[in-house]
Amino acid sequence: DAKTTQPPSMDCAEGRAANLPCNHSTISGNEYVYWYRQIHSQGPQYIIHGLKNNETNEMASLIITEDRKSSTLILPHATLRDTAVYYCIVRPLSARQLTFGSGTQLTVLP
Amino acid sequence: SAVISQKPSRDICQRGTSLTIQCQVDSQVTMMFWYRQQPGQSLTLIATANQGSEATYESGFVIDKFPISRPNLTFSTLTVSNMSPEDSSIYLCSALYGSNEKLFFGSGTQLSVL
C-alpha cells in the first residue's frame, strides 16, 4: 500500500477555509485517496474519497494533483466542531480494509 | 450514512477477565472489521470478520486473545480475553458498504483494564 505523509498539526481560524495537505508520492493507478476524521474518542467519520478527479460533497472538497502524488482536503468554512484528527488514506482496489497513518490534528480557533 | 451500533460504549474490567463487544449494522454488508486504537495512537486493524468462517487476523493478533464471531451479515462480536492493562484501548467496529465501498465506523468501545 502507498504510504501517506501529513503534517502532524495545523491551526485554522473559524470561518476560514481549512486546507489539509497529504503527500502520497508512491500511489499507484488503482489506488483511491480517502479522507476520514476523528473527533476525540469517537469513531472515525468518512469525509470524501476520489481516484483522480476532484470531488466535492456537502462536507468538503478533495483536490488531487494531476500526477496524483498529492492531494488537499478543503473544508470551505471551518467551524469549532471541525476540530479533529484528519486522516488521509490510500487504498488499493484489491484491499477492503483501510490502513491509518498518524493524521493531522486540525484545531479551529475562535 | 450508515448506522453502526456498538456496545458497550465503555467498560472498566479486572485483569484476567474477558469482555465481549457487540457490533450491529443497519443493513447487510459485505465485510466487517475490528480495529484497536491505543491511547494517543492511530487505528490498527485487528482482523476481518468473515461471515460463516473464521476471522482473518493481522500480524500480531491471534484468535485465542481476540476471538471474533460473525453469525450473519449484520452482526459481529469481538472478545478481548484474559485482559491485562495493556489491553486498555478503544475498540472499533467498521463495515464496508455498497458498490462504492465506503467504510463506516461504530462509535467505539472505551475499555479500561485495572
Image: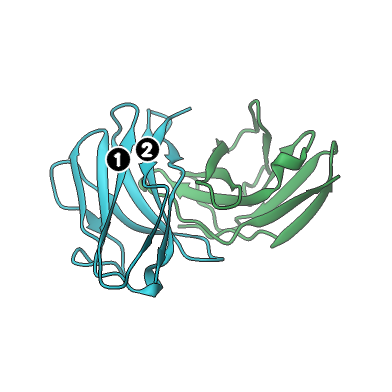
Look at mark 2 in the image and give the residue it sits on: B96
Q: Quadrant of residue B70?
A: top left
| Farthest residue, direction left | B52
* Of callouts 1 and 2, the N-terminal one: 1
Instruction: Count neighbours of disc 1 (C-alpha within 10 A) and say few if under 14, some if 14 to 19, many if 20 or more.
Output: some
The tint chain B carries is cyan
Residue A93 at x, y = what percent? 40, 43
Q: Hey, what amino acid is under mark 1?
A: Met
The tint chain A carries is green
Q: Which residue is at a point 39% across and 43% down the rendered structure image? A: B94
Q: Chain of mark 2?
A: B
Residue A30 at x, y = what percent? 46, 44
Q: Do we see residue A70 in this rendering?
A: no
Residue B90 image label:
none
Q: Quadrant of residue B82?
A: bottom left
Q: Hey, what amino acid is under mark 2?
A: Leu
Residue B68 at x, y = what percent? 22, 53
Look at mark 1 in the image and give the residue it sits on: B31
Q: Chain of mark 1?
A: B
